[in-house]
Image (cartoon, coloured by chain):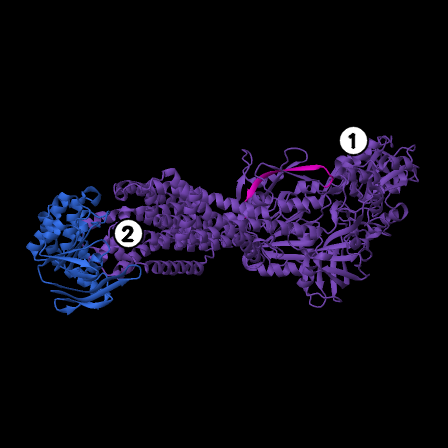
Amino acid sequence: MLSIKNISKSFTQRGTVLDNLCLEVEMGDTIAIMGPSGSGKTTLMNIIGLLDKPDTGDILFKGGSISNFSESESAAYRNMNIGFVFQDHLLLPYMNIYQNIFLPLLAAKHSNIQYSDKRLYINELMIQSGIYDLKNKFPSQISGGEAQRVALVRALVNKPSVLLADEPTGSLDAKNAESMGELLLEMNREYSITLILATHSNDIANKMSKKLHLVDGKLVL
Amino acid sequence: MQGIIRIIFKSIKFYKIPVLYQILIIVLLSAVITGSLLTGESVRQSLKKTSSESLGNTGILISSGNRFFSPDLIQKMRNGSNISCTGLVELTGFCQNMNSQKGVVNAHIFAANKDFFAFQGSDSLSIKPGEVAVNIKLAQYLDLKKGDELIIRYSEINDIPADAPFAPDRKVKSVVMKIGAILEPEKVGNFSLLISQITPLNIFMDMNDLENDGHKINRILFKKDYKNSLIALYDTFKNNLTLKDIGFKIRTVKKTGKNELVSDRVFIDGTIADEISKVLPSSARVITYMGNHFKSGGRSTPYSFISGLPSALYPEIASGNGMIINRWMANDLGVKEGDAIQLYWYSPDSLNKLIEKNSHFIIKSIVDIKGIWADSLLMPDFPGISGKESCSDWDAGVPIKIHEIRKKDEDYWNRYRGTPKAFISYEKARELWGNNFGPATSFRFPIAVTVKDIENKINGSLDPYKVGFTITDIRAQSLKASESSVDFGSLFLSLGFFLILASLILLSFAASLYFDSKKRHINTLYALGFKNNRIFMLLFFESALINFAGCIIGAFGGFLANLLITGALNTVWNGAVQTNTLHPYFNIIPVLTGFVLTFLTIMVLMLIKIKRYLKVLHRKGIEIYNNHSGKKNLIILFISSYITISLLILSVLLNEQRMFFSLASGISLLLTCVLLWRQYYLGVSKRVQRKTETRRQFSRLYYSFNSSGAVTSILFIAAGIFTVFITEMNRMNFNEKAGNRSGGTGGYLLWCENTIPLKEDLNTDFARKSFGLDDTKLPGLRFVQMKRSSGNDASCLNLNHITTPPLLGTDPTDFINNKSFTFSKALKTEHLRNPWQYLKISPSSNVIYGIADQTVLDWGLKIKIGDTLMLRAENGMPLKIIIAAGLQSSVFQGNVLIGMEYFSKYFPSVSGSTVMLAEGKPESAELIRNTLNDRLENYGLSIEKTNNRLASFYTVSNTYLSIFAVFGVLGMIIGIIGLGFVLLRNFNERKKEFALMLAVGFKAAKIRRMILSEQLLILFAGVLSGILPAVVATSDSIMNHAKIPWMFMLFMVLALMITGSLVLSISVRSVTRKSLIGSLKKE
């Protein structure tokens, strides 16, 4: 489904971060990418999500190259196919939980029927992730673990093919981290979403189908 | 400490861009403040220079006003005071270029001897006979060059006040002179004894070329290096002042062998008469008058003189209504002792108009024309009567019916001249004929009093002030007037208030941006154990250093601003100063003041900001977004709307106060609009909850929880637009209202000023006929004639602080009847319904009421209603003028109005009217103007439409408004730049939000559009919330069809919108994918 071919990325201050990196991802895969801080995990995630572009190499999504997508195409790709979860939940403080979850739907136009469907879907996700009762609360009124669940639901609202989670449990305590890990896998199973996870946590990584290490700009088993 | 300093410098170096922003704003602020203060100094110094230049070497001035005195006094003063002095005649006249026929009125004519120029330090200058020198301004006005011919007209020099009884008609002298020199300001070309920055129109001529018997003068100038006190000079002057100097003669009456004292002015002033009576108690007053008719039993004797004699010297004289007549008249009237006789005479009324009065007398005795009863010297030396060969040659200053003069009357004149035909007591005569010009026509002395006795007693004992002289340190007065002139420093600070405020707000935004960017730095310091106070000191010293650098550079910028502003005042803003002679002056005091003022203001701002910043820094950002309720705002909005509507209704109902209520409703509407916008933003949250899928609503959700961010910007833009709009819309233009009776013109069409006083009352049929103004084409033509005393223009056209304004003597009857003009303020009394009536009453002797334009009171004279203006009457006595009322902007600006009755009483020598208002049908304005110009050509008439005169005063305030508008627009531009800062700050605050949006599929361009639309809505809301209230606030002007500069305002709004959009578009460009993705990682 997702094929990353020989991508390289370097920064002026950090030097080469990704070096001829290759990765093949099948639908429904759960992949953990591990590596020390600064090894390029976030850069790789950003490149997969087309938030950043590689200096060289190609990315194929469902057989087609997406490396040279325009800004508009990249945004549509992200909106329709990618869900992001970050270490910082990045909930907007002035929106309530429901509005925060609804946000990705506003990036593209939808019909009223589509909106109705999405609302039902959001409710379903919220119930499933145990945050339905929080829908009218503001981010300041919920816990870190709850916030991260909200962020996950938000990432799933457009039914993406790939969920990119960058250190999703990095800010959570062990209990919440475990619970978050379970939830991610549950979503993977329930909705057949491909999960690519950047993490330092061996516990979570061990639960993934593939565990890769990013060393010297390359992914190794 | 060294460590701290190192941290500060390193921090400044690291954050150089935000620091540079702050420095630039501080430079601007400091330059505006220092520049304003330096401009104030420049104007003050320029006025001083102009004063000094116009006075030349003159230090002290002795002036006799409209009177003339002997030039012998110059030499006597030179000897007595041992100081260089010179004398001259100062007149006003009008002149015309012979070739081009171009002319000017109110030219200053200075007739002087050769020593005048030497006195002024221009030894080489002299005026040849038949030539005149003019100053550059006059030469430019009339296109004169050396060798050209100039016709000069001026009123003849005559000791007798033109309005005095039996004064002959004053003639206009006309001379053609060649231009011998055109004098530069450095060569006293702009010589002036008036206090004004406006360059006069000067003509200098040789004393010998002025028709002036005895070369009398009316000014003595003393050099500026005179070191002694004015009192010492006064004493010297008093000691040297003789009767002869002020036109008195002592002669021996042959018929009685006694001496008498007579004056060239005919009537002897009351104050001088009292002085003489005081030093010579044995003196006795005589008053001789001309009767129109003596009538008895149907017979009449025309035009005969009658004397009021003192019983001390004439024991035979009858008291009360008793009269002695001579045999000639007894025979002519066929009367005998005990018969009644009726006397008719002309008497000037309180306004100096001649009215015929009469009184009954009883003949006590009939005397032969011999001895003391054949005393032809009893008749004063009336210039139009004395020495005339025939009665029909008389120029008596009163209407003489020649056909009533019989042959026997001519024979009497030939044989006895002016020998009085009747005699009454002095007391009775004074009661009938004593007038503003004096209570006596001569003093007579007992036989024992010799000429020497009189001279010894009086010479050197007369109080100069009481005989009409003023002694002034004109240089000190002039410099004081320029020192306390309009303070352009504070003026520009207030005109630039909006700019200063805008800069401070911008600085506040820039500082916030700077502090925000240092957040991580500060947090690190906290983490390292730095105490709150230490971090505060760190930030405070850092700000102080940035502030200091900005203020220093700004102080130099102030020099540039001073150059620019004085340059503009000399050219495009000339209307505010009426001169182009301002020079930029640089003085360390205003620079230091500007520096300190700016530095302290900014430090106070920074102190508040740093404290607030540190307080907020550790508060959870999240809390900020809680607890916002629209309910409170809705209540305030409701109240504000209610007030606005009420004020609007009041502005419609109360016609008189419409202007005030319109303005008040405009301000209220502005606040209502802003509250409405706040309500809109607060309501966004609810609307989003109702209809989640509205993307536009979502984008404004941020301001729903941070409405102050949007509302502050809206308020700032709206207030700026509102201020500039109402400033522009309230530009004082002549509108229909100004032309109404209640407006500034009083409903009059023309304002006329004549150089040669007009003695006639132009409303009488007689005068109309004699001037050819009885034209049926001029229906409704009516005049209000006024007399004007000399003084310094106190209008807004004069920048100096004036203490001696010209007085306008006027009869307010027409103003009362027509309900002309409107008062801003007036003294409250129960019995006076109209403030004009104050001009008809006097609370006590030497105390009268005056009225002036409120602007004159506030700015020119710096006094208020109820205050007393102290001036000197012509007789030297202090005259207290209580300011009874202030007029709304009117054609009288620059003058203080007093009642004509009191003007004539206290300034009898000011004869005839020199100012008049003409009314008639508006469509005939041009015809009236042309007719008056034609018929009063010899009076040096200048006619101005009242609306143009009013407009010329408006020029000053309009220029101030222009300056304010320019600064306002600059302020708004800064405000717009501020919007850019707000946007950048918002961007920094919301970076994660935008990064997330990017991650969930929003395009960067869409995010930019969203931010831009948020900010544009704020800009649009601000503009709309400024314009609508401004239109309401100035509805009064709009309804009065005032000239509203719609184009300017449209241009301004467009410029604002375009600049705003541009600034915002540029600022929003920093929102890029690259700048955002870094924010996705947790710090």
Boundaries of the magenta span: B874-889
Residue B118 tag number = none
Secondary structure found at label 1 = loop
Which quarter of the rendering shows the N terminus of chain B?
top left
Q: Nearer the viewer, residue B185 or B877?
A: B185
Q: Main secondary structure of the magenta part?
A: strand
Q: Nearer the viewer, residue B81 or B16?
A: B16
Whether residue B793 is situated above or below residue B147 in the rendered picture: above
Is tag 2's residue or tag 1's residue first in the polypeptide sequence?
1
Identity of the amino acid at label 1? Gly
Work out whether residue B773 can be spotted.
no
Work out whether residue B280 can be spotted.
yes
Q: What color is chain A drawn in? A: blue
Please tell me which residue is depicted at 80% across the width and 56% down the height of the picture: B123
Spot occupied by residue B693 in the image (x, y as percentages of width and height): 18, 54
Q: Which residue is mark 2?
A: B990
Q: Output the letter for the chain in purple.
A: B
Q: Nearer the viewer, residue B31 or B188?
A: B31
Q: Which residue is mark 1?
A: B320
Q: Chain of mark 1?
A: B
